[in-house]
Image (cartoon, rainbow, N blue to C red):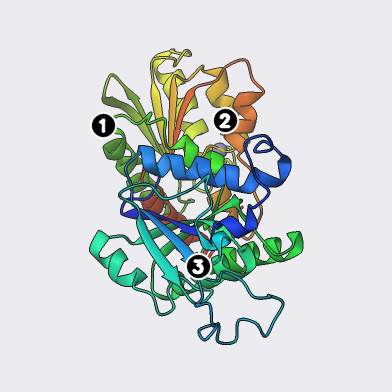
Amino acid sequence: MKLEKNCALLVIDIQQEDFMEMNESNVDDPRWEVIRNGKRVLDVFRTKKLPVIQIKECHRPDMVDFGRELDGSEGIHCVENRPGNDYAKLTYPIEGEYLISKRRYSAFFATDLEILLKGLGVNTLYMIGGLTDVCIHYTAVDAHQNDYHIYVVTDAVAGSSEEAHESALRAIHYLQRNALVTTADVESTLTDDTAPEDDAFMREAIRLSELAVEHGNEPFGAVLVKNGKIVLTNENQIYTKHDTTFHGEAGLIREFCAQTSITDLHEYTLYSSCEPCFMCSGAIVWVKLGRLVYGASNMDLEAILGNKGCNCSKMVFDNSFWQPQVTEGILREEALEILQKYFGNHQKS
Ligand SMILES: [Zn+2]
């Protein structure tokens, strides 16, 4: 995964009152896993020097500003002069982080969050904290309705119950199909394994994916590169060749090997507009490809098709004798757009 450009992290309501019993001797306790994950996400944003906005809920001691927040399941919470109202110690704000206090569940409601986001030039929000079904959900909804892109780190948010947590994540996924990410996804962005030419070759793979549709096939393109030069390109040709295995990647590998008699590709990089399927990942193993770069993931594709999906290339590589170096998420949004346009109207064969 790559962090989107112009993003910020919203740390939502990670306040001391929920972590009163947390101390140095029990910090590794399973019950603190969510806040530990939150700290890992926070560390990524701090390392990359990306904006962090720490948000806490607080109410005046005379409770005049609670509004209707006590009508439901919640008791008196987040009162200003109580010690628990401060930010939790593990994720405590550091210099340079922005602080916002809110009176309601949504971080957008009657706060200056939007003014701050405008000033920072931010259009994408990553979220950690709680509760998944209350402040995270309502903030995600308001962000979405204000046209921000949203990513909720699913193992760094906690709900009022496991069931409520899962339901809220489903509701957020309904708003934006790729909105759910994990702490490991965010951490994977720390290893910057991209090469300067990746964008240009991926753009060519995406262009080929569009051409494939024009030629009557499915929207997948692949580009094989050695020493910074394209040696062969291919597009999906399953319909025009009457060959359901003629995918962008597998077709390219077969043709390249046949044309050149080279069957060891450890010095080559393959760019694919979408993550290779099980079959193509297998072909990549057999030719010992050196490096694989892809745009959209199989999970992205399956989400468009309404399926759960899996990280198929990783499953193949992790269980094979050969593992190429893999870079994912290059020009992902552009790659996704082509897939969405096509599979919004067609079923995958
Ligand atoms: Zn394939």
Q: Which residue is mark 2?
A: 281
Q: Which mark is residue 140?
A: 3
Pinpoint residue 274: horizontal percent, then vertical percent.
Answer: 47, 43
Amino acid under label 2? Ser
**Where is 234 relative to 338, above or below?**
above
Residue at image position (68%, 49%) is: 21
Amino acid under label 1? Pro
Q: Which residue is mark 1?
A: 196
Q: Earlier in the sequence, mark 3 or mark 1?
A: 3
Amino acid under label 3? Ala
Tag 2 secondary structure: helix
Labelled pair 2, 1 in contact (Cβ < 8 Å): no
Q: Nearer the viewer, mark 2 or mark 1?
A: 1
Residue at mark 2: C-beta within 8 A of ligand 1: yes
Mark 3 and mark 1: Cα distance apart in space: 34 Å
Q: Nearer the viewer, mark 3 or mark 1?
A: 3
